[in-house]
Image (cartoon, coloured by chain):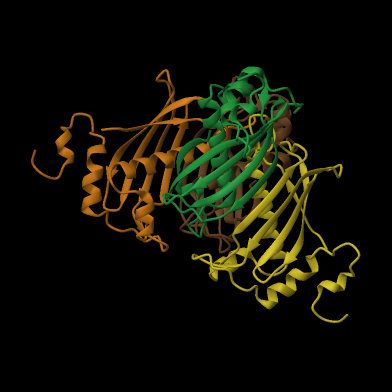
Chain colours: A orange, B brown, C green, D yellow
Amino acid sequence: MKFSVPKRVRFHHCDPAGIVFYPQFFYLLHEVQEDFLEHIGFPEHQLIASGVGVPIVDLKTEFLGMCRNGDALTMTLELTRIGGSSIGMQYEIHGEAGDTRLKAHGVIVYSEVPNGKPMRIPDALREALLPYLKTPPGAQPHDQKTATP
Amino acid sequence: MKFSVPKRVRFHHCDPAGIVFYPQFFYLLHEVQEDFLEHIGFPEHQLIASGVGVPIVDLKTEFLGMCRNGDALTMTLELTRIGGSSIGMQYEIHGEAGDTRLKAHGVIVYSEVPNGKPMRIPDALREALLPYLKTPPGAQPHDQKTATP
Amino acid sequence: MKFSVPKRVRFHHCDPAGIVFYPQFFYLLHEVQEDFLEHIGFPEHQLIASGVGVPIVDLKTEFLGMCRNGDALTMTLELTRIGGSSIGMQYEIHGEAGDTRLKAHGVIVYSEVPNGKPMRIPDALREALLPYLKTPPGAQPHDQKTATP
Amino acid sequence: MKFSVPKRVRFHHCDPAGIVFYPQFFYLLHEVQEDFLEHIGFPEHQLIASGVGVPIVDLKTEFLGMCRNGDALTMTLELTRIGGSSIGMQYEIHGEAGDTRLKAHGVIVYSEVPNGKPMRIPDALREALLPYLKTPPGAQPHDQKTATP
């Protein structure tokens, strides 16, 4: 299942060429991460207040189309992997015509703050993440689940 | 040859965990790009004023070590490719002990503003870029040059 | 009449002390300005696309209470003056308990881009702004209107 | 005595009109504050690491001239008041021709982190601040000092 959220390109995202300055896309991706964690019942600000962080360790981004001030974007998130501590995050940004503007894949690590030591993702969070895990081609959706269907 | 520039982690780069919030690294990388283009005699603000932009189309980043408020960083840039319109940029961020904090590889495209149409990199700029092109292992440095030594 | 919009404090607004870093408040105020202009039918991105800007010339801010990651804020905007070219903007930020966190007053100028020359606010925009003009104590609301009641 | 530091307008400071987006000025002012505190021997990141913050409580800004990508700016800081806990900071930004682009006055408070409780400015810091205290018209510079000349 994909998590999807609309975002508007704001004036402050844009550069002198009138398009989104690329580091600003990562603020938007992080907003999607926050929206997602809140949606599944684990608001990031509560995780942080409890001494947990989710720093990013790897990020690959393809910039496929320019985004301009005022553009109405749809941003999606799907998980590519739920490991012991790490989570693979696949983001896409689409324009109003459905065209793909950006694809990004990040890996975040559930960690202790401030030392950054990886911690095992708690079972309750893992359960909440599972519905968003991308099903590999050919697999049955429930293969991702731990239990019988 | 590597282009190298010192940068200080500023308060505004840091997040509630006291470390650089990852999108802020890309502001620093872009500052290095600006410093580099100015150093080789092609200030980015002059390129832009002349109707040229250098949007990024691809970016891969490994976040290898946390950077904290006040850290003195050394940032380096080397070119991995100088194509017809595109330039491969290899960045590294090192801490005071020489430890690697971040590696990134970006591809930018010399383009018309605002339509984003790729343009051929002018010869004068190409010449100025060449000394920073990474020599492949086993190659002679002058293999990168167009002419005889 | 006050224009009111909810905003959430995001991770990226916060500094190493876990509170909103003060320049980030101005991004939020500018978002409110964008939301307001869109609400009254004059989206800022369309104004800009038509060669108009609304640069700020004066800003006074009182920071009255700390805002933390995840805080649900209510932001309000009221106009203190609609001049020939300039508009007085009174912002307030309130926490969930109704406590005031910030008060700001800005003056923006309806201007030509890129030369920055002030232009007369068009009548249609003026009409749309009028309902948000703060009534001076003792005045009748329709005193603000240009015509008969 | 004025503290003075050069700053360059960076691409990331600029908006679709090609001028500095006004919240970005406050990042620059905060950089000046950091540069100043480091210059007088009290680096802000060390203050913060020791449990002290300097949140801003009041800020007044006049935006007097546009700043464009690549502009070489001179930023100055002078203190208007050194109170028990609070410090008045007078900033100015000048262009290459000496023209004034921005004037700002902020009040920061030496405070405990994270509760924000004001603390008395330590004597050593007070001594280091004193040379930058603006002399009122007609006063002798040494009037600001605590001791006899």
* Image position of A100 with respect to B69: above or below: above
- Whether residue A120 is visible to the viewer of this picture, yes or no, is yes
Rendered location of residue A62, percent (x, y): 46, 32
**Residue found farthest to the bottom:** D148
In the picture provided, is C68 more to the left or to the right than B93? left
Q: Residue at x 46, y 47 (%)?
A: C9
Quadrant of the image containing the N terminus of chain D = bottom right
Rendered location of residue A106, percent (x, y): 39, 42
- Whether residue B118 is visible to the viewer of this picture, yes or no, is no
In the picture provided, is B40 more to the left or to the right than A41? right
* Image position of C57 with respect to D126: above or below: above
Rendered location of residue B138, percent (x, y): 55, 43
Q: Residue at x 38, y 35 (%)?
A: A91
* Image position of D49 with respect to A92: above or below: below
Q: Residue at x 64, y 55 (%)?
A: D58
Q: Looking at this view, is C146 or B32 the one in front?
A: C146
